[in-house]
Image (cartoon, rainbow, N blue to C red):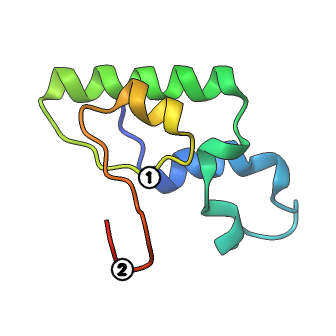
Amino acid sequence: MLSWVRTEVVLMCRHPYIPRLGGPSRENIDIAETIMDIQYTLNFLRAVSEAVSQAGRTVISALHDLNLAATFSNRMVHEIGQDRI
């Protein structure tokens, strides 16, 4: 079972973009799945999906790729406007 927190997973993906002598910034922990190689993204989402199913848990996520969202989600909410869903 996965034991990483979201920030750790995101920073793993962002590692090549964080300066050696600097730490992560707000920009380094935003929109992780859009910068990941598609194979890593698929493997990650499959692993999360399997772990969630086995544990009987719920995950709420924000995916910018609607194909990935449709593939790995039971339910989807789409933001239509600034104040409406």
Residue occupying image coordinates x 81% and y 59%: 18
Local secondary structure at mark 2: loop
Residue 25 appears in the picture as rendered: yes
Residue occupying image coordinates x 24% and y 30%: 52
74 above or below 81? above
15 relative to 83 in the view: left or right:
right
**Label of residue 62 in the image:** 1
Q: Position of residue 42 (x, y in %)?
A: 55, 22
**Classed neighbour count for the residue bearing mark 2: other residues with Cα under 10 Å, few (<14), some (14–19), many (≥20):** few
Quadrant hosting residue 71: top left
Compare residues 71 and 16 and report the one nearer the observer: 71
Name the kind of residue labelled 1 in the image.
Ala
Name the kind of residue labelled 2 in the image.
Asp
**Classed neighbour count for the residue bearing mark 1: other residues with Cα under 10 Å, few (<14), some (14–19), many (≥20):** few
Residue occupying image coordinates x 51% and y 27%: 44
Q: Position of residue 53 (x, y in %)?
A: 20, 23
Quadrant hosting residue 35: top right
Residue occupying image coordinates x 16% and y 28%: 55
Give the spatial CA distance, label 1 vs label 2: 17 Å
* Residue corresponding to mark 2: 83
